[in-house]
Amino acid sequence: MNPAAELQTEVLAALQRSVRGTVHADRLTCALYSTDASSYAVMPKAVVIPHDRADLQAIVEIAQRFQVPIVPRGGGTSLSGQAIGAGIIVDLSHSFGQIGEFDPERRQIWVEAGCTLDRLNNFLKQHGLMFGPDPSSSASATIGGMLGNNSTGSHSIVYGMTVDHTLAIETILDDSSIATWSTQPANNPRQQQIQAQLGQIVARYAHAIERDYPQVWRNVAGYNLQRMLQRQQQQQPFSAVPILVGSEGTLGLTVAAQLSLVPRPKVTRLALWHFDDLQRALALVPEMLRFQPSAVELFDRYFINLTRQNPEYGARLSFVVGEPRVVLIVEWAGADASELAANDAASTAHLRALGETGLVVRETQPAAIANVWAVRKAGLGLLMSQRGDAKPLAFVDDATVPVDRLAEYAQGVEAICREVGTEASFYAHASVGCLHINPLINLKTETGLAQMAHISQAVASLAINLGGTTTGEHGEGLARSAFNQQLYGAELHQAFGEIKQLFDPNSIFNPGKILAAPQPWQPEILRINPSYQTPHAPSVTFFDFTPDGGFAGLVEMCNGQGVCRKADAGVMCPSYMATRDEAHSTRGRANALRAAMTGQLGSEGLSSPELHEAMDLCLECKACKRECPSIVDMARLKSEWLAQYQATHGVPLRSRLFGQIAKINQLGMLVPRLNNWLLAQPITRWLLDRSLGIDQRRQLPALARRSFRAWFKQHKQQSAASRGPLILWDDTFTLYNEPQIGQATVKLLSAAGYSVYLINERRCCGRPLISKGMLAEARANAEHNIKLLAPFAELGVPIIGLEPSCIASFRDEYPALVPTNAAKAVAAQSYFIEEFLVKLAAEGVAWNWNQQLPADKVLVHGHCYQKALISTSPLLAMLRLVPNLAVQEIESGCCGMAGSFGYEREHYEVSMACGEQRLFPAVRTSQQPVLAAGMSCRHQIEAGTGVIAQHPIVFLAACLAD
């Protein structure tokens, strides 16, 4: 064994002996933690998920003993590479998320480092408080990461930076002792020693601090010596907190912090100014600031165009009119609406007097304002939704200059990019001179690497020459630490070195950040570089991935932003919400696929058992197709991967049975009563559990005594249909399990003036086959069904579906499985039932509703595919067609059943955990009828709560007058 391997073994053995948490050193976990949201990748030696503070102390002691670096990590949302490194990654996001002592009167709270900002603010909302700094990554950014980065946000002109709101910090020091830093006297000997020498360093370099710090206050490069000096000069009590905030994990391991809070604004209004010229817009920012806005944010045409292509965020972009070059979001927030309106009016009058004639869109309603900020917060992900190898990369993304030099700076950056044959997108914090600038670069080429090197150096020099800083928000990390001496000069750079030596003499805490940094364009530390290859990516696929640049191209769309790690809202990612495990997030799976394709998981590539473990808990909910700003469709990737995997390992019998559920139900309908009796017997369920892994705690769906088609043959429709023919897709479950759904649909559609037709000889839509990776069979079904449906679709005949997964297959999967014009025609004419009925209502169709309703209020759970493809808005609008019916949507994620997923023994616990997140508690506490369009959703609700949910169409038909 070579010395490096021997050391690795000894370190792992020591960690496993001393740490109660989980220690990982396998190649998959290390690959997952080798990247964050930056362009960089560095393979760690190990990943530790600590259980408690004693674990953290043990990790530091072991790191010191073996001289192995420690890299603290929260949500892994760093854009500069602070959360990666070649040592022990310590993931604090799993076990250190507690909210501690809270004093609402003094507006103070203790929070552990792994708590996300959104979780903290959700807790504080009921008290009318919040934490001031608001980075866009708030759903997944942790308090520890914000402390390390000295995070800010869109409202920094009001709330400043994280350091402005940090009262005390608890850290693990280099000697593995615990220290709490505040204005109180230190009682830790090591802490006392540090504090005594720290004050001396600040005094010794006072002149250089006053002379050489950048002219902008929004600066997160280096250590906050200027704030320490200010405290000395103002004779404030000594506190090392300013040095620790923004230190990027280089001075100790942060455990928790005491934060000060601010009142939540009661009223907000927006003015969205449209400009045809970037420099003109930026030149007017200082004028806007005269009228006390709470934010001035910018986004450009490049951003707008990419946003319009996104299914989730494109629909939100209603506040952008025409094709402006730039839009400035100007916000006023406070307690008095009239005061905000007066400031807005005065600002407008002033700008008009200066000759500005651009369009202004105003938003004053909370929902519309939230809509604007949702688009703005998704900025990076939307930019990274650019398909192809060239990406708008974040490596010079947050240099900050004085606001009155912002136009000059932007003009200079555009010239720098033109010099090397590329362009850049501009967005973000115009109010403080901190534009996020993302040059379009293909790092797979030598040209792209050279462009990165040139732009990095030129932009840093430009910002410094204009009196600015290399980073005003995202920190130095691997992206900008190399410019620290250029920014501050040799004297202050030396002072930073003394600070590092004082706190961390053996340099175990996150080395290579702020000091002793590599050049940020070194190929060895870049995730994508000219030597990047994907030898194990499939050369032939079942789905057409051409729009994404191939299978590998779609995998590479994941930029690591970590939106999929949110835990309290939306659908993405249900398995992460249930497990809090990085491997079971969309980002984790994308990184696992990339590791397999590039050979990091060995020669097996996509057939790797490790990859199977990472992919297995993907529920294929498609939430990532809508909620991921970069549109990483992990459901499709999983289906394709599973098909490739099973080509080597074979298709399990259980998968074949679930994939062919339509044929199995058809056979069962020969003796439905016997079928139902057998499936209800404990011995049958036990046998299915032991032989096939179908969990005996589940009750398989019962068959109807008479199929929907048998009823339909005997049903007499009105002879004259004023609106013509319509195709009803009677899915497997409507056909065999719940024919009353089809009957209700025929009643509603007939009342609307349609003749309803069924397609003879049609096959299952293929969704069960797709979910099981049986893509050859799924494609055959798709080709067969397209051949039957296309003639009707080409005549404009609507195709209506009741089970969301079926229509999702027609609209989303068929054109990719069978990339023909016929498939596109079928997709274009396929409608979710609620979508179609709302369309009819908009065209003037009216139904005759009962005065006496089955219930005056209903609770609605949306199917994942409804949310992914069309949102739940049509579903809610359909139910609200009934007069006086109160409709409440459950703010739930995935129910957890996901077709056959929840029936499988190894998935049962995760399935139920998904339901317990938000869905089950909401159902249990309600007395109203529960409506859910998905067959699997209804069964999961019953299994988890005992409540029998209805299909919305059944309820709607019951509201019709006879």
Image (cartoon, rainbow, N blue to C red):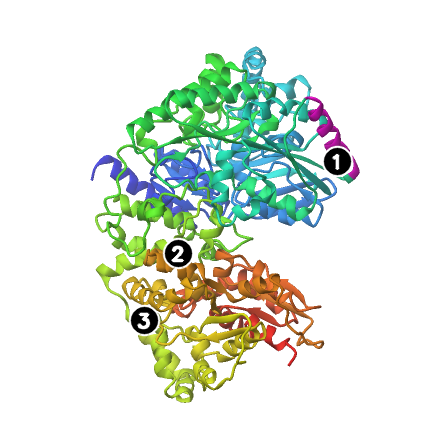
Q: In the image, is residue 590 above or below residue 226?
A: below
Labels 1 and 3: the sequence-earlier one: 1
Magenta span of residues: 338-354
| Residue at the image position 46 percent from the left and 38 percent from the top | 383
Under mark 2, the amino acid is: Ala
Q: Residue under circle 2?
A: 635
The answer for how far apart the CA atoms under marks 2 and 3 are is: 20 Å
Circle 1 or circle 3, nearest the eye:
1
User: What is the spatial separation of the Cα atoms under label 2 and label 1, in whole angstroms?
Assistant: 45 Å
Using the image, tell me which numbered label, if any, was put on residue 295.
Answer: none
**Residue wearing tag 1:** 340
Looking at the image, residue 45 lies above or below residue 523: below
Q: Which mark is residue 654?
A: 3
In which quarter of the view is residue 697 placed? bottom left
Q: Is residue 862 left or right of residue 131?
A: left
Amino acid marked by disc 1: Leu
